[in-house]
Amino acid sequence: MKLHYRIIGEGNPVLLLHGLFGMSDNLQSFGRQLAEKNHKVIIVDLRNHGQSPHDSAHSYQLMADDIVELLQELNLSKVDIIGHSMGGKVVLKLLNAHADKINKAVVIDIAPWFYPIHHREILDALLVIDLTVIRTRKDAERALAENIKDQGTLSSYLKFILGRTGSISVAI
């Protein structure tokens, strides 16, 4: 899958991978800081997130394969990589299957074992939204607010649903 990405800076290539419901926007500030230290920072939207394509197929293996494809597209043989949460699980898959493509790896806020579903209430809130009737951000906010009471969480998931363009783009 051809992923959306942004590049900041020049130098040693470093890939940044976001967490579940995240996107490359979430890592731009950190990416700029790394770029100031002579790194070519590649901030990726993983499949089914941000501006990357959405597909019903979704697994850590597929996301790792997508990253390998991106490395080939960018003609990068070996990179440093930082993955947060779900992105960290992708890094672990890459280390397992494609260690030859990784120079250094940092995994943040996740460990190499199975986690039980702990976003159930948020997933349920997203699944009950009738996307055929939502036309505006306010419509989406009202629909989510019925099940998500915390304003910070609500804002975060609105961004996931609306993406950077403001149009409905969720694929769950």
Image: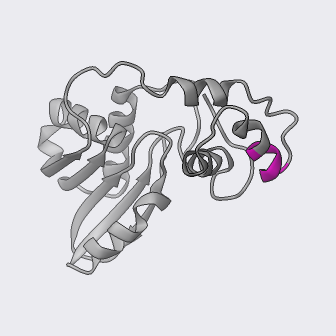
Q: How is the image coloured?
A: one colour
Quadrant of res 5? bottom left
Identity of the residue drawn at 47% across and 26% down? 58
Residue at the front extreme, as displayed: 149
- Quarter of the figure that contains the C terminus: top right
* Magenta highlight: main SS: helix
Identity of the residue drawn at 70% across and 38% down? 144
| Residue 65 pos. (x, y %) | 34, 34
Identity of the residue drawn at 68% across and 49% down? 162
Say if 63 sits above or below 15 in the image: above
Q: Is residue 41 magenta?
A: no
Q: How many marks?
A: 0
Q: Magenta span covers which residues?
A: 136-141
Say if 144 sits above or below 113 in the image: below
Quadrant of res 147? top right
**In the drawing, does residue 171 fall left or right of residue 86?**
right
**In the drawing, does residue 131 fall left or right of residue 48?**
right
| Residue 113 pos. (x, y %) | 21, 23
Nearer the observer, 110 or 171: 110
**In the drawing, does residue 58 fall left or right of residue 54?**
left
**In the drawing, does residue 17 fall left or right of residue 111?**
right
Nearer the observer, 1 or 90: 90
Q: Is residue 139 magenta?
A: yes
| Residue 114 pos. (x, y %) | 27, 20
